[in-house]
């Protein structure tokens, strides 16, 4: 209680004395915590949204039978219904259908057998709607949309709704509106229900089902029922609890979420540097007060508690503000995150930001505990101040100077540890050691700053001594003489610049790799696909007659029909695909880890083998020549792996087999997409016209030139890094606040020095230039260290973290642009941070400054 | 010559006006050693600040030779402080981040003299104040007396017309204080520089050629010791 009183009397009143520093520190913590909260909130909202959608769509089902996107024969249904323990079984067609004329908007369409639905899902019509007649329910165009969707799109009963289903535009008639509860709230209301027969026709799934939902009796265990079902089902079908899908989604998004979390943690880390700095400055400025308090009987522990409490208080206030800001920022972030997930993983509509109170407590706790931890070292140093010695500014700096060689040694050790941590593989699919390596790298280089400041200051002073640059010389002198103050600011900003450089180099290298990959692999002149396919989960295919007809069109040298289905493979979601290997061997090209594309593809075709993507090879520990276990309708087969190819289209892995083998295994002769190679001399526009004519007027088929497709790939690529770039800017903003804090405090604590300078003849401009020069030199040092750290960081990101998270090989590509960009930013930010302190210094009145006893 | 005519300096403190200097008129001829004497709060430091061109009077005028300081621009005042006025403070006011020789050379550095010339002039001043062996020491490595001698060396390195010393012995023991006063006397004698010493010590004041007694911002009396 006594400590609290002292705390209240000293710290709280010090806020009035140093409002700028307190404000800047609190703002820094708030921004760091906001970034962390926003990312977590967006991640959590996405997962919850997925989870809820999966739950409400599953309804009361206890088990689900599926074969991924491959689907299966509907004739299995009666056999399933007869299994002892199965109380009810409901067939489902599930697909995503884009809304015609509204790019980016889509509906999750559920085709259900209304007579089998009662035990599973409850459908309530919106208030006032009459119960529909049976012929309405079962009509060939009948569709039910949610009232929320209807409201947003100006629909009512009887309105027409045009959807892109399969490869055509199809008209549906809204026969009723579902009340916004239960099922109708999934995907933010972007959901429609129709009769299963209508769905089968619309989505070209005649006689096929995507899923069978089951309600099972309680007297028989689920494992027992699964065993009984296995006896009547083909081996490639899986029987799982609905929540298993949640786990799959979580697993699928884990690397993506972890990467964002790590980025937001850097912003938080930079903010904690700021707290360390602020408390250190507070100890410095209040050294006399500490001496007085000690002489009045306050113990060392009491002094330490005082400053630790100051750090924790700054952290708490900043965290509380940050949590609020984080929720707002999260809303903005959510849009971008859900777009990325929709583009890369699965169709997603998020209802809005929603977070468990636990996350808010976690963010406040992390911010406060982090700030407390960051203030422990300065609190300890404050506790060493004796009652007689009011710690002199010089003694604080001398302590830092004494410790700087030791810090350099520690930094070297951390760099060695950083290198060592790049060697081990992932832990449970997570590049844990990779993140440790990153942390060691940042802290290691941060440890270099005191010694480097000394060397840089001394070097510059020596340089300026002979070149008549008095102001720079003074600024350089301050740089090395105030190691303690400057080192932390440099370290904080270095971490932010390193993040900028590292991410820019990584993203740039990644983009260049993808560009090269796209150039090398997309050789077809024209890509023909259902328009609906640009939305994940549409499962849209080209009509069989179109595929057959296309092969007869003049001007085409070859066609490569592509089919791809998402299935569970080696415990993760992967794309099982097929193409015409002979056509790809002759006209196309794939980049293989080892060997020539044509040779590998022809061997795979001849031996009935497959080629797999690099990420799948890494995840499954598979190599060229190994055999890939696959469960197909005829049972379990092991197919030889003819080659491992680079693929950046999916992180879940890809298995591709020749079309002949695909047809043998799945009995499927159709195509989702056609890659068309034109005959020499033929005109793309003419061929396109002929194909459009073949498709017919109602077709919703896109004809994309290879150039446009390449551009589209890169556009998706760029959009996935929007959040990363935003977080990068946030970290820099926090670091700029750090430099501002240091320079501001430096000007305040050097009032007398500035007064002396003015009294011995320094003009106001000279004083301002000295402070700005100091800021510029800090910025320069930050840039050099940040570039070095960022370069190493990008190598760790490329060769360790990305490789272990996603299984992608990225070719490192250095860019001078990053040097220019980071230099402008580091110097600009430092000078900007120095501007107000410089003005403050220049405007200081000499008599008051020299009389100041700080 | 320094001339003050009806100089008043008022500070607004806590809503009230405090007259630190109240209508002082005083002339100090070139080469004179004058002591300003009086108790704390009598206006000694304010007067030193006004003569030293680091503060401006609320009313009245301050002249240094022909120039009226209170009407000069900030830049001109700065240049005057750099070349024509040297100030020595009670708390030495050395920059802790610069060595003794760097502190001494600071006004020349700001003036933009070549490094070689600065080094030569600093070396001369260090010799003069008897600290050649302490040239590269940091302020915290010097005794109080040594620090004050460095401060004096800094004040005279640009060979100013006027040296202002504000309680230069207030923070020193009697031996060190005596040495500092002797040094000031020697500078006045040998360099013909005008010296204004603010002190509350009668013993220190007796080293001057004239003592101006101040009380409540006014000249109470003038004596010649």
Image (spheres, coloured by chain):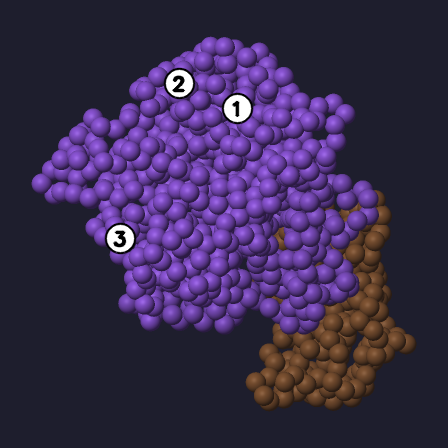
Q: Chain of mark 1?
A: A
Q: Is residue A495 visible in this depiction of the protein?
A: no
For residue A181, above or below residue A246: below
Chain A representation colour? purple
In the picture, the disc for residue A121 is 3
Mark 3 nearby-residue class (10 Å; few <14, some 14–19, many ≥20): some
Circle 3 SS class: loop
Reading the image, the residue beneath label 2 is A628
Q: Chain of mark 2?
A: A
For residue A369, above or below residue A201: below
Tell which of A850 and A614 is nearer to you: A614
In the picture, the disc for residue A579 is 1
For residue B113, above or below residue A744: above
Mark 1 nearby-residue class (10 Å; few <14, some 14–19, many ≥20): many
Residue B156, x across and y down, in percent: 78, 60
Tell which of A257 and A376 is nearer to you: A257
Mark before the other along the chain sequence, 3 or 2: 3
Image-based side of A371 in relation to B20, left or right = left
Residue A116, x across and y down, in percent: 24, 48
Image-based side of A101 in relation to B27, left or right = left
Q: Residue at x 53, y 48 (%)?
A: A169
Mark before the other along the chain sequence, 1 or 3: 3
For residue A517, above or below residue A77: above
Both marks 1 and 2 on one chain: yes
Label 1, label 2: how many angstroms apart (C-alpha)?
18 Å
Q: Residue at x 44, y 66 (%)?
A: A156
Q: Residue at x 67, y 22 (%)?
A: A557
Residue A148, x across and y down, in percent: 41, 63
Q: Nearer the viewer, mark 1 or mark 2?
A: 1
């Amino acid at each position: 209680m006594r400590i609290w009183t002292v705390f209240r009397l000293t710290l709280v009143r010090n806020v009035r004395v140093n409002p700028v520093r307190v404000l800047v520190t609190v703002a820094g913590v708030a921004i760091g915590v906001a970034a962390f909260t926003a990312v977590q909130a967006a991640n959590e909202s996405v997962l919850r949204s997925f989870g809820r959608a999966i739950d409400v769509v599953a309804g009361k089902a206890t088990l689900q039978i599926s074969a991924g996107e491959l689907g299966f024969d509907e004739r299995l249904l009666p056999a399933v219904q007869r299994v002892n323990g199965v109380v009810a079984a409901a067939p489902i067609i599930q697909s995503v259908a884009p809304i015609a004329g509204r790019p980016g908007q889509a509906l999750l369409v559920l085709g259900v057998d209304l007579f089998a639905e009662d035990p599973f899902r409850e459908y309530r019509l919106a208030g006032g709607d009459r119960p529909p007649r049976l012929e309405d329910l079962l009509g060939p165009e009948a569709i039910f949309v949610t009232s929320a969707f209807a409201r947003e799109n100006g629909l009512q009963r009887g309105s027409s709704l045009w959807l892109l289903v399969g490869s055509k535009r199809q008209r549906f008639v809204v026969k009723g509106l579902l009340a916004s509860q239960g099922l109708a709230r999934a995907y933010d209301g972007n959901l429609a229900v129709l009769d299963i027969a209508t769905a089968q026709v619309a989505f070209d799934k005649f006689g096929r089902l995507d899923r069978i939902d089951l309600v099972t009796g309680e007297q028989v265990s689920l494992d027992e029922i699964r065993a009984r079902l296995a006896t009547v089902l083909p081996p490639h079908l899986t029987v799982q609890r609905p929540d298993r899908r949640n786990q799959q989604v979580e697993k699928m998004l884990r690397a993506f979420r972890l990467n964002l979390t790590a980025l937001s943690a850097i912003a938080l880390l930079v903010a904690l540097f700021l707290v360390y700095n602020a408390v250190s400055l507070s100890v410095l400025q209040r050294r006399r007060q500490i001496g007085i308090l000690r002489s009045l009987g306050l113990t060392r522990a009491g002094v330490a508690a005082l400053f630790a409490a100051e750090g924790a208080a700054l952290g708490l206030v900043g965290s509380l503000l940050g949590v609020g800001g984080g929720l707002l920022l999260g809303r903005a972030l959510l849009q971008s995150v859900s777009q990325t997930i929709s583009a890369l993983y699965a169709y997603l509509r998020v209802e809005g930001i929603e977070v468990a109170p636990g996350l808010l407590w976690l963010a406040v706790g992390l911010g406060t505990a982090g700030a407390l931890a960051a203030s422990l070292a300065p609190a300890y140093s404050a506790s060493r101040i004796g009652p007689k010695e009011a710690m002199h500014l010089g003694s604080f700096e001398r302590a830092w100077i004494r410790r700087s060689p030791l810090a350099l040694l520690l930094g070297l050790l951390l760099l060695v540890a950083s290198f060592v941590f790049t060697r081990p593989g992932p832990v449970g699919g997570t590049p844990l050691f990779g993140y440790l390596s990153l942390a060691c790298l940042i802290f290691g280089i941060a440890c270099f700053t005191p010694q480097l400041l000394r060397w840089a200051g001394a070097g510059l002073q020596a340089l300026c001594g002979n070149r008549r640059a008095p102001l720079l010389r003074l600024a350089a002198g301050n740089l090395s003489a105030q190691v303690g103050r400057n080192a932390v600011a440099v370290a904080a900003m270095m971490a932010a610049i390193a993040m900028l450089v590292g991410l820019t180099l990584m993203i740039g290298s990644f983009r260049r790799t993808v560009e090269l990959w796209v150039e090398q692999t997309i050789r077809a002149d024209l890509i023909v696909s259902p328009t609906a396919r640009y939305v994940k989960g549409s499962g849209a295919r080209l009509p069989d007659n179109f595929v057959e007809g296309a092969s007869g069109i003049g001007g085409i040298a070859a066609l490569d029909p592509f089919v791809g289905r998402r299935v569970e493979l080696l415990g993760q979601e992967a794309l099982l695909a097929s193409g015409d290997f002979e056509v790809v061997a002759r006209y196309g090209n794939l980049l293989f880890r080892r060997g020539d594309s044509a040779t590998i593809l022809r061997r795979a075709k001849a031996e009935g083998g497959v080629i797999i993507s690099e990420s799948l090879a890494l995840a499954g520990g598979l190599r060229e020549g190994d055999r890939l276990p696959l469960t197909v309708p005829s049972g379990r087969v092991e197919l030889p792996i003819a080659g491992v190819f680079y693929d950046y289209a999916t992180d879940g892995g890809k298995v591709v087999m020749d079309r002949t083998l695909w047809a043998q295994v799945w009995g499927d002769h159709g195509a989702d997409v056609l890659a068309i190679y034109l005959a020499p001399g033929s005109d793309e526009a003419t061929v396109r016209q002929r194909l459009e004519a073949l498709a017919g007027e109602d077709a919703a088929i896109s004809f994309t030139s290879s150039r446009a497709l390449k551009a589209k790939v890169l556009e998706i690529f760029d959009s996935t890094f929007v959040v990363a770039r935003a977080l990068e800017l946030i970290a820099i903003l926090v670091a700029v606040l750090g430099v501002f804090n240091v320079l501001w405090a430096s000007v305040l604590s050097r009032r007398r020095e500035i007064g002396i300078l003015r009294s011995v003849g320094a003009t106001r401009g000279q004083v301002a230039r000295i402070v700005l020069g100091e800021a510029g030199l800090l910025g320069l040092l930050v840039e050099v260290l940040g570039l070095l750290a960022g370069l190493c960081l990008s190598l760790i990101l490329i060769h360790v973290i990305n490789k272990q998270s996603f299984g992608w090989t990225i070719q490192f590509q250095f860019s001078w642009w990053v040097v220019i960009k980071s230099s402008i930013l580091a110097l600009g930010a430092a000078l900007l941070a120095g501007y107000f302190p410089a003005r403050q210094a220049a405007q200081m009145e000499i008599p008051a400054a020299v009389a100041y006893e700080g | 010559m320094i001339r003050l005519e009806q100089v008043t300096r008022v500070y607004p403190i806590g809503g009230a006006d405090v007259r630190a200097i109240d209508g002082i008129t005083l002339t100090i001829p070139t080469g004179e050693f004058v002591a300003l004497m009086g108790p704390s709060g009598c206006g000694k430091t304010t007067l030193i600040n006004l003569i030293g061109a680091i503060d401006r009077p609320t009313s009245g005028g301050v002249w240094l030779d022909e120039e009226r300081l209170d009407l000069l621009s900030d830049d001109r005042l700065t240049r005057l402080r750099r070349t024509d006025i040297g100030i020595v403070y009670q708390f030495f006011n050395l920059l802790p981040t610069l060595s003794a020789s760097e502190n001494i050379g600071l006004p020349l550095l700001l003036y933009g003299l070549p490094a070689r010339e600065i080094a030569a002039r600093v070396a001369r001043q260090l010799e003069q104040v008897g600290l050649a062996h302490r040239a590269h020491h940091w302020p915290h490595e010097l005794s109080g007396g040594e620090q004050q001698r460095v401060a004096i060396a800094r004040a005279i390195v640009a060979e100013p017309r006027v040296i202002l010393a504000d309680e230069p012995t207030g923070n020193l023991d009697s031996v060190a204080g005596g040495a500092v006063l002797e040094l000031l006397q020697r500078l006045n004698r040998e360099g013909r520089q005008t010296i204004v010493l603010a002190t509350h010590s009668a013993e220190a004041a007796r080293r001057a050629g004239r003592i101006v007694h101040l009380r409540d911002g006014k000249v109470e009396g003038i004596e010649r010791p």
